[in-house]
Amino acid sequence: MLILDSNTISYYFRGDPQVVSRLQALRPSDLGVPVIVEYELRYGLLRLPPDVAAPRLAALAQLLRPMQVLPFDSECAVPKPPRFAPDWRPWARPSGRTTR
């Protein structure tokens, strides 16, 4: 699954050729959008005048409809170490010294 952020969706709506071709090459069911991204996009559009916001909100809803909207709760907010790094803390050094 490819998880989209608000910038990627904004580039899609602006017609960025790289983003448009990449997203159109994938099945919508293989795309995910965190609910916080959906909120951010809707909030930004609702700051526009209603006559400008309405068609953009409709286009956003149509784009998101077949995608998986991913939850974001407290469990998601807890940082987890990457699977590829033995010690993911940026201030830790193998010698035990820290840079704080």
Image (cartoon, grey):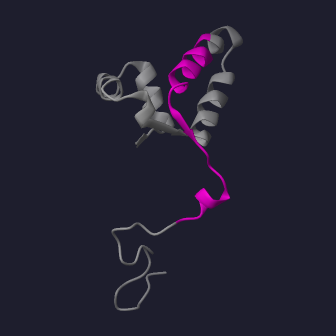
Q: Quadrant of residue 40?
A: top right
Q: Quadrant of residue 1?
A: top left
Q: Position of residue 48 (x, y in %)?
A: 66, 19
What residue is rendered at 50% in x and 67% in y?
Answer: 80
Report the side of 52 relative to 20 (left or right). Answer: right
What residue is rendered at 29% in x and 27% in y?
Answer: 18
Q: Position of residue 20 (x, y in %)?
A: 34, 23
Q: Determine whether 1 is above or below 24 in the image.
A: below
Report the side of 78 relative to 24 (left or right). Answer: right
Residue in the foreground of this view, choosing between 15 and 61: 61
In the image, the segment drawn in magenta is 55-79
Q: Determine whether 81 is above or below 75 in the image.
A: below
Q: Position of residue 84 (x, y in %)?
A: 33, 68
What residue is rendered at 46% in x and 29% in y?
Answer: 9
Verify whether residue 74 appears in magenta: yes
What residue is rendered at 36% in x and 28% in y?
Answer: 23
Verify whether residue 64 appears in magenta: yes
